[in-house]
């Protein structure tokens, strides 16, 4: 994918999809959640960003971040997070033996797919669509019947804040594609 072009906007808001290698269902395991939480905390302490929305699924995650003014380097942040998680979990789950030739050549641990997908949020409607998509994703994948049944999501935070209620729930409108 040499012609992959990323849109870097200083202080931008982005929707991300990050996937495990071979879509292995590793992310909801306690040690993976801890490694991810630790990696994000470490990276945010050195390279701040705001997490607007988040959902962790067994084989991928979706999130929305806003970067600080004057900073557009989400790629570096994801590289550091993914490397940190891979290092913490290097002896777990047999991921080192599942590496592709490209991963071996690049000395990657094999926990994550090499790339990630991002979308620069264009406006408030785009943000709302992706925000709801993040929270509705466990239902879309058949992991739960109701959004509130999935515990690894910022949905619960926004429900407590009153953003969602019985009149407004994720999935009520069309949502972003994956």
Image (cartoon, rainbow, N blue to C red):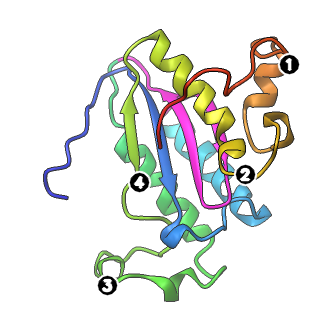
* Residue reaching furthest to the bottom: 97
The numbered mark at residue 79 is 4
Which tag, 4 or 1, sits closer to the chain's start? 4
From the image, tell me which residue sits under label 3.
101
Q: Which mark is residue 142?
A: 2
Element under label 4?
helix
Closer to the observer: label 3 or label 2?
A: 2
Measure how far apart labels 3 and 2 are at the Cα level.
33 Å
The reply to whether callout 2 and callout 4 are in contact (CB within 8 Å) is no
Above or below 92: residue 146: above
As measured in the structure, the alpha-carbon distance from the residue carrying label 2 to the one carrying label 4 is: 30 Å
User: Residue 160's mark?
Assistant: 1
Place of residue 165 in the rendered image (x, y in percent of width and height, measured from the top left): 83, 15
Residue 100: tell me if it is visible: yes
Identify the residue shown where x is 80% and y is 47%: 144
Q: Residues within 10 Å of mark 2 (few under 14, many from 20)?
A: few
Question: Helix, strand, or loop for circle 3?
Answer: helix
Q: Are marks 4 and 1 in contact (CB under 8 Å)?
A: no
Q: Is residue 52 magenta?
A: yes
Query: In this picture, which residue range is highlighted in magenta?
Result: 47-69
Q: Earlier in the sequence, mark 3 or mark 2?
A: 3
Quadrant assignment, res 107: bottom left
Q: Please, is residue 122 above or below residue 5 in the view?
A: above
Who's the residue at 76% across and 52% down the image?
143
Residue 152 counted in the magenta span: no
**For the residues marked 2 and 1, what is the alpha-carbon distance in whole angstroms?**
24 Å
Q: Is residue 64 left or right of residue 140?
A: left
């Amino acid at each position: 994918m040499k012609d992959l072009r990323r849109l870097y906007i200083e202080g931008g808001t982005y929707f991300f999809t990050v996937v495990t290698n071979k879509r292995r269902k590793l992310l909801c395991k306690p040690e993976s959640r801890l490694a991810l939480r630790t990696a994000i905390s470490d990276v945010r302490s050195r390279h701040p960003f705001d997490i607007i929305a988040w959902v962790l699924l067994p084989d991928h995650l979706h999130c929305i971040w806003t970067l600080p003014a004057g900073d557009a380097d989400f790629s570096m942040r994801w590289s550091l997070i993914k490397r940190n998680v891979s290092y913490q979990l290097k002896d777990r789950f047999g991921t080192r033996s599942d590496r592709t030739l490209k991963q071996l050549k690049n000395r990657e641990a094999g926990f994550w797919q090499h790339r990630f997908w991002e979308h620069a949020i264009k406006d408030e409607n785009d943000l709302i669509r992706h925000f709801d998509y993040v929270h509705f994703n466990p239902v879309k994948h058949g992991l739960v019947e109701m959004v509130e049944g999935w515990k690894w999501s910022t949905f619960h935070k926004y429900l407590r804040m009153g953003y969602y209620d019985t009149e407004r729930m994720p999935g009520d409108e069309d949502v972003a594609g994956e």
